[in-house]
Amino acid sequence: MCGIVGYIGDKFAAPFLLDGLTKLEYRGYDSAGIAVFDGKEIFIEKTVGRLDALKDKLKNNLPNGSIGIGHTRWATHGRPSDRNAHPHTDCHGDFVVVHNGIIENYMSLKEELIAKGHVFKSETDTEVVPHLVEEYYQGNFIAAVREVLKRIEGSYSLVFMSKANHDELICAKQDNPLVVGIGEGENFIASDIPAIINRTRSTYILNDGEIAIIKKDSVTITDRNGKVIDKKIFHVSWNAEAAEKGGYEHFMLKEINEQPKAIKDTMRGFIKQIRPAKNNNDERIAQDGSQIIFPELKWDPAFFNNINKIYIVACGTAYHAGLVGKFYIEKLARMLVEVDLASEFRYRDPIIDDKTLTIFISQSGETSDTLAAMKESKQRGAKTLAITNVIGSSLAREADQVLYTIAGPEIAVASTKAYTTQLILMFMLALYMSQLRNTLSTERTRELISLLKKIPSQISETLSDVEPIKTFAQRYGFNEHVFYIGRSLDYDVALEGALKLKEISYIHAEAYAAGELKHGTLALIIEGVPVIALATQKSVYDKTISNIKEVKARDAVVIGIAAEGDTELEKYIDHVIYVPNTDELLIPLLTVVPLQLLAYYAAITRGCDVDKPRNLAKSVTVE
Ligand code: M6R
């Protein structure tokens, strides 16, 4: 996730900018840069790589000047490079901008600006912003910024700097964090509190739609129309470590709570309202209504009709996302999919030819087994698609095509927001394929898309009441064995729930397809053993209830996960956790959340190191 800093005051800006960016390093980044007005010009230095590389470049050339902005970039549009690093400028270097987020309509804006003669230097979405300021500037900086904000769509925290107006910085927020730090004779801007915590603890936390005009002695906050907002100062009482985690005790909990935003960001730009186009030859995607589009996928639409086999290959949590992905593609696009563990795939002589599509899922894009499996599959002639969270990662570079989850850096070893964003991407891919293959009615597509859009707020709802989950974790957190059961998609989610519990709380947890219990595992069910039973899949609901009765009859303690409105399950078991109701295809995105929380609070109960569990690494780069 990009980091932003800004300074205006009596002191030199550059030392604060570099220090602030260092404090934001934990957010993850691939390049960095600063811009400082030196009294005559806006001096810019930026580089791909670590902050040390930037500091090295500035070693004998630190700009003097008391107003500046800085940025660490986590690439979304355009690979990591010097050119794509922020800050970005207009044609003449008069306006400089740093940005965290995604400008969704940047392509059309870029075309418009190029037609007007603007020259672009980077591949980023951000660069349209300073060019737009140049376009609208008529001597009034804030007026130009307001016009720009009317034109851009998407998510952003933005800081604007102007050569002609070097006594102020302007910033704007929409869907990405931005904080103004209030000092004496100086003020600060940051995307996150750790950057400013050793300078000031008095802050304004900006809300969506707010604009701040920051001078060295004043901060004015307005809405988009210029109406002044009387904002309360927020006094930060966190220490530096807590500030990095946004006030959460662990990165894992922070990342669980980031899921609504991560999902929104991942969906952004892929759902389009399409009107029938006269010259569109493909009637299947020319119907009115919501459609899934994947502008990034450069394959001809006919591609998905010509392949005859799909493999999904991944490790760990990403493998579990692949299992759900298989269900989606088979159900919606009616294509046969096999899911393989990357560590097994290439050793089993898989049947691959040039009509095979292999999809590789990896948060980091660096997992050695997944990379090796991709290389093997390319050698055998398959088409390859990577689904990863890291732009420019090895997997992304190696694949024929790439789709990105926009979860932001995942720091906790236990994967949470990567999993749910992988599910969302797999769901949209399956819907996209169904459109191209004409396997789903328009009504069903529309229904699913409208339910899809509700998922972020439904996750927020699930996250709003964690007390019952905490209580279960405290009550059962010292058991040595826990079983997870479910059928169909519930089984796939059960596998992920069990992995979460194992890896961070060290409790022996196993997931079983509920119908399989009687083929062996039932022998392990004795009095008091906790069984987490997922029962959300309508087509197998009655059968799942029968399996739940089987474990209940052996005196297990059963905690059910059900959709709101289910009045049946609570009749048979000890406790039920309800998640909001949605289509049974989408419900894994909701049922996994209490399981993540259960694992988290069980680990806390047992005093485990949640973010860095024993024996595990975030990214497994060895075979
Ligand atoms: O970076 P990747 O998605 O390729 O990582 C794959 C697994 O190592 C990873 O999902 C691992 O299982 C997580 N620690 C699970 O929480």
Image (cartoon, helix red, strand yellow):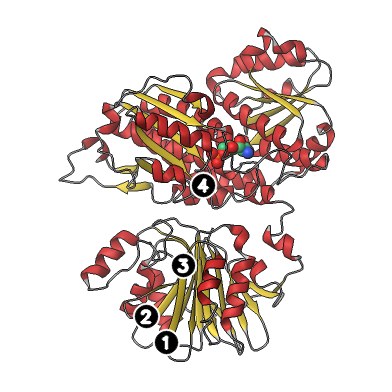
Quick one: SS at disc 3? strand
Q: Nearer the viewer, mark 3 or mark 4?
A: 3
Instruction: Judge whether residue 358 can be spotted in this image.
Output: yes
Instruction: Judge whether residue 581 can be spotted in this image.
Output: no
Residue that label 2 marks: 93
Of the residues shown, which amino acid type is indicated by label 4?
Ile
Q: Residue at x 70, y 13 (%)?
A: 521
Q: Residues within 10 Å of mark 3 (few under 14, many from 20)?
A: many
Residue that label 4 marks: 263
Marks 2 and 1, how far apart at CA: 8 Å
Of the residues shown, which amino acid type is indicated by label 1?
Glu
Asked whether, in this view, residue 171 is left or right of residue 153, the answer is right
Of labels 3 and 4, earlier in sequence is 3
- Split into 4 quadrants, where in the image is the C terminus? top right
Of labels 4 and 1, earlier in sequence is 1
Residue that label 3 marks: 47
Q: Relative to 11, say whether 320 is above or below.
A: above
Looking at the picture, how far across and down is residue 378, in whole percent?
A: 36, 32
The furthest residue to the left: 279
Asked whether, in this view, residue 468 is left or right of residue 464, the answer is right
